[in-house]
Amino acid sequence: MSYNLLKGKKGIIFGALNEDSIAWKVAEVAHREGAEFILTNSPVALRMGQMDELAKSTGSEVVLADVTSMEDLENLFNIASKKYGKIDFILHSVGMSINVRKKIHYTEANYDFYHKAIDISALSFHRVMKIAKEKDIMNEWGSIVALSFIAAQMAIPGYNDMSDAKALLESIARTFGYYYGKDKNVRVNTVSQSPTKTTAGSGIKGFGELYGFAEKKSPLGNAPALDCANYCVMMFSDFTRYVTMQNLFHDGGFSSTGLTEAIMEEN
């Protein structure tokens, strides 16, 4: 069912890879709610995923952009400006850690890989907003959302240097969000999602155990990717015009729950 929450709104969605990714679900829900948008990801992600399929089903254009490249991002926003004039929303759903992929322990981190994780997963968010602000491409009361995870607040072994990247991501949302709100009435938030069975999530050591633990600890259970997409679309809508600089937990209550009966019964 469509509520036309984004009727007439335009945007850019970063990070859709395949139908398991949250960004993919956000694109589908945004399309259902009446939005038009550009899909963007790196050339490598395009080869790995099925973005062309998503573009066809949502009537969207695909523009390749490496989020570590100012030139690529400038080109992306120039295309968006030419296509739409101004836009109303941006989703940042980008994260990558070579240390995680190579199963290098956090205390033994390769720092070249560490820098790459921070650059792609967090600093890219600053780059995106810097260019958007400089080009004055966002409409007033526009909404920018980045996806985060509770490992930014607590130690979760296995999440590795991505924990630090997510912590920086949330800090950037607060600080840049202050200036973007003050200068342009644009809101900036992060959404901290439950452990979710995505391509990226499945590469984290101990993810299966973490997913099961969160399911038992959360009074509502783990939030599915589709529900996260619904939440993000609500954040893009006019119903959340005064929400900004927040890290919003979408995790079934996991972040606010201590020891539960289900966990105690196992011990």
Image: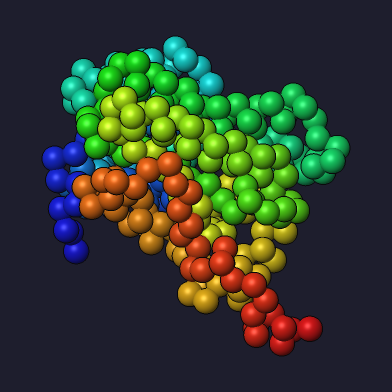
Q: Is residue 197 left or right of residue 58?
A: right
Nearest the eye: 88 or 53: 88
The picture places residue 54, in percent across and down from the top left corner, at: 33, 43
Scheme of image coloration: rainbow
- What is the count of numbered marks? 0
Nearest the eye: 98 or 237: 237
Nearest the eye: 87 or 78: 87
* Position above or below: 97 against 70: below
Nearest the eye: 13 or 247: 247
Residue 109 visible to the viewer? yes
* Position above or below: 66 against 177: above
Residue 83 visible to the viewer? no
**Residue name at image x 24 percent, y 20 percent:** 81
View extreme (top): residue: 71
**Residue name at image x 35 percent, y 16 percent:** 134
**Residue name at image x 77 percent, y 27 percent:** 111
The picture places residue 145, in percent across and down from the top left corner, at: 40, 41
View extreme (front): residue: 182
Quadrant in which the N terminus is drawn: bottom left
